[in-house]
Amino acid sequence: QVQLVESGGGLVKPGGSLRLSCAASGFTFSDYYMSWIRQAPGKGLEWVSYISSSGSTIYYADSVKGRFTISRDNAENSLYLQMNSLRAEDTAVYYCARQGSGSGYDLEYWGQGTLVTVSS
Amino acid sequence: SYVLTQPPSVSVAPGKTARITCGGNNIGGKSVHWYQQKPGQAPVLVIYYDSDRPSGIPERFSGSNSGNTATLTISRVEAGDEADYFCQVYDISDHPGVFGGGTKLTVL
């Protein structure tokens, strides 16, 4: 079955960096677009970034553009999110999600999430 | 940017039908997906492309989309359906997608 397991979250000071990882299994990772979605405490969902199956197409939300970098290693079945210059407003649970096969950007499977807390 | 409006809360008695709306300008012309999120858990896709149901999702969950409103309908509501429900819209002009603010479904 499809499994997505995030890691790398934690407490970091404003201006600091973190690298999130997502280990995928149970499907052909290289066939799917992958995304990072975040949810601030008690808030709704925000699409942070996505990357195409080959890595050639990448999207970032305006709120993270220039600070976050998404990448993937299809040989290792892994997705990454490098987060630099972190701000208090980046505090959230970060979910890794697999997009569906169609063009409608549905998020078919989600990991359990990893909490990032930005605080001094 | 495109705005999706969901009621903050909906309450329903067990065995009854719950309807959760997602409003947006001409949303009927867009693809709508719905997610269920139980406390402390990740979201789960329950309806995609307006009315399709992923495998494993009960037939009690259905969706519709027309005009300015998309609706998630849950028939014969059970206590286990209590959760937050989010709609998400994809349209080329709102790439890759916009989420509604979420609706908390309470089973009385």
Image: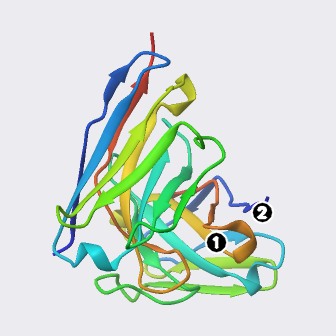
* Cβ atoms at labels 2 and 1 below 8 Å apart: yes
Residue A25 drawn at (x, y percent): 16, 68
Q: Residue at x 38, y 51 (%)?
A: A95
Tell me the number on the disc at residue B2: 2
| Crowd class of label 2 (few under 14; some 14 to 19; many from 20; radius 10 Å) | some
**Label 1 SS:** strand
Coloration of the structure image? rainbow
For label 1, the crowd category at 10 Å Cα-Cα, with few meaning under 14, some 14 to 19 and many 20 or more, is many
Q: Which mark is residue A5?
A: none
CA–CA distance in space, label 2 to label 1 = 9 Å
A112 versus A27 height, above or below: above
| Side of A96 where A105 appears, left or right | right
Label 2: chain letter: B
**Going by the image, does B47 lie left or right of B29?**
left
Q: Is residue A113 left or right of residue B101?
A: left
Looking at the image, is mark 2 or mark 1 earlier in the sequence? 2
In the rendered image, the quadrant that contains the N terminus of chain B is bottom right
Location of residue B72 with respect to A24 vertically, above or below = below
Q: In the depicted view, which residue is nearer to us: A26 or B59?
A: A26
Q: Is residue B78 visible?
A: yes
- The image shows a total of numbered marks equal to 2
Task: Report the residue that reaches farthest toward the top.
Answer: A120
Instruction: Give x and y (percent) for residue B47.
Output: 48, 80
The residue labelled by disc 1 is B89
